[in-house]
Amino acid sequence: MTRYHPLEFPPDFLWGAATASHQNEGNNRNNDFWAWEHLPGKIVDGSISGLATDWWDAERGRAEADFDRAEAMGLKTMRLSVEWSRVQPAPNRRDEAAIDRYRQLLLALHQRGIRPMVTLHHFTNPLWLAEQGGWLDDDVVGKFVDYANYVVQKLGDLCDLWCTINEPMVYAYVSHLRGEWSPGAKSFGQTFRVAAAMAQAHVAAAQAIHQFQPQAGVGLVKNIPVFDPARPRHPLDRLVTGWQDRLFNQRILDAVYKGHAKFPLAAKAANPAPGHDDFIGINYYGPHSVRFDLREPFTLFGKNVAPPQAEMWDAPWADRQIDPAGLRRAIKRMAAYGKPVYITENGLADPADTRRPRFLLTHLAAVQRAIAAGADVRGYYYWTFVDNYEWVEGWTTPFGLIALNPETQARTPRKSAALYRDLIAANAITPEIVEQYAPEAIAEIFEA
Ligand code: BGC
């Protein structure tokens, strides 16, 4: 029998899990997504976020109990977000009690030896901002920087890893082009204006955070789908693949890391001055195989059509492919900017947990191989810790290492939770771990 060597991670590698305020806290009644989920027909299962994972209520202490579980699992870090609508419930009002609760949560993490990473914007906007035009408002950059300043002054002693904005292109695209989130617009012009505003807001907030907390690590979180032509030699597939990559990936990377903000139809945006980022956050959920299709104007005439041999997510709603090699490509592309990288999200919705163990192992193997090849990847945040409210998918797509019954709030760890604990304890992918949790993946992992 072949003897395989463990794939080892660097000694200070940060093993983590990622979460977000609206998806976890519960009762976020003052933001635009809460309003949206209450409109008929917006959420596939007609559900609302409700209590979500009930992290906000201090007396019930369910966040703290989850942090106990995270500690027992060996987690080194946890990514969570601050809800703008809680700390600034009205344009001229700030809520100290909300800040206090965030301080409690961050302290609770520190007490368990878990380093927090905090995101300032994860898809939701205060209702008052939405009423002023949201990310189309002329002053939104200033408003975001004010909010960021306030949060960092209040929480900076408890956090030194800040993500400014989560997945700006996903937010711009889903809210302003696909019309699936508030405000439900279908406009290319709006989409690019929002993207340009978010790029500027990121740069300005990073600068502001550094003024107050020079030693802090600050980064943008970018969802990096790898785009490939469905038919590699087909000129139209290649053409639209290039368009998608430029508009979804490259334009905002150029804006943020090079100061070239060239978003079409968004002439109003000034070029941000780059250079304040300390790391790059990569969210990776799979590749896109792009096929030219005239019926798809919203995706620039490129339809995501998986090749027949592709392995797919086992869910009727997801046209997502499973491709750990794509994560390695995403890391290579982003590591070329010369900054440390965190995998700020990577995960799979898999209620029965039949595919997640292999998914976790093969994606982590891709991370390890990228590190071995020289990429400076500092940590990995599995999305997500406990099943949470999945935006328009409602409660239908459980990503958690731990299963949640949203009605009873009962938690049940999945097999993947034990796998993650064992990986963290070993700080490596060992042949024994693979044999135990996903023996079918042994060659894929060690002979890559
Ligand atoms: C988002 C998360 C979301 C996850 C799974 C990411 O795009 O940042 O909020 O739950 O994907 O779909």
Image: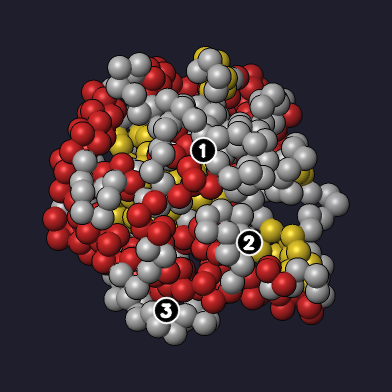
The residue type indicated by label 3 comes to Ala
Q: Is residue 163 above or below residue 360?
A: below
The residue type indicated by label 2 comes to Arg
First of labels 1, 3 by sequence position: 3
The residue wearing badge 1 is 383
Quadrant hosting residue 131: bottom left
Estimate how packed mark 3 is, as few (under 14), some (14 to 19) or many (20 or more) residues with alpha carbons within 10 Å: many
Give SS at disc 1.
Answer: strand
Estimate how packed mark 2 is, as few (under 14), some (14 to 19) or many (20 or more) residues with alpha carbons within 10 Å: some
- Judge: label 1 CB < 8 Å from ligand 1: yes
The residue wearing badge 2 is 178
The residue type indicated by label 1 comes to Trp
Of marks 3 and 2, the one in the foreground: 2
Instruction: Work out which residue is located at the far bottom of the displayed protein and give it.
Output: 267
Relative placement, left or right, of 302 versus 132 is right
Relative placement, left or right, of 375 versus 241 is left
**The N terminus sits in image quarter:** top right
**The C terminus sits in image quarter:** top right
Residue 177 image point, x, y percent: 60, 65
Residue 252 image point, x, y percent: 46, 70
Residue appearing at x 35%, y 34% in the figure: 77
Mark 3 near mark 2, Cβ–Cβ under 8 Å? no
The residue nearer to you, when weighing 142 against 41, is 41
Q: CA distance from mark 1 to mark 3?
A: 30 Å
The residue nearer to you, when weighing 42 against 269, is 42
* Circle number at residue 261: 3
Residue appearing at x 30%, y 22% in the figure: 58
Q: CA distance from mark 1 to mark 2?
A: 24 Å
Q: CA distance from mark 3 to mark 2?
A: 23 Å
First of labels 1, 2 by sequence position: 2
Residue appearing at x 63%, y 70% in the figure: 244
Residue 233 image point, x, y percent: 81, 74
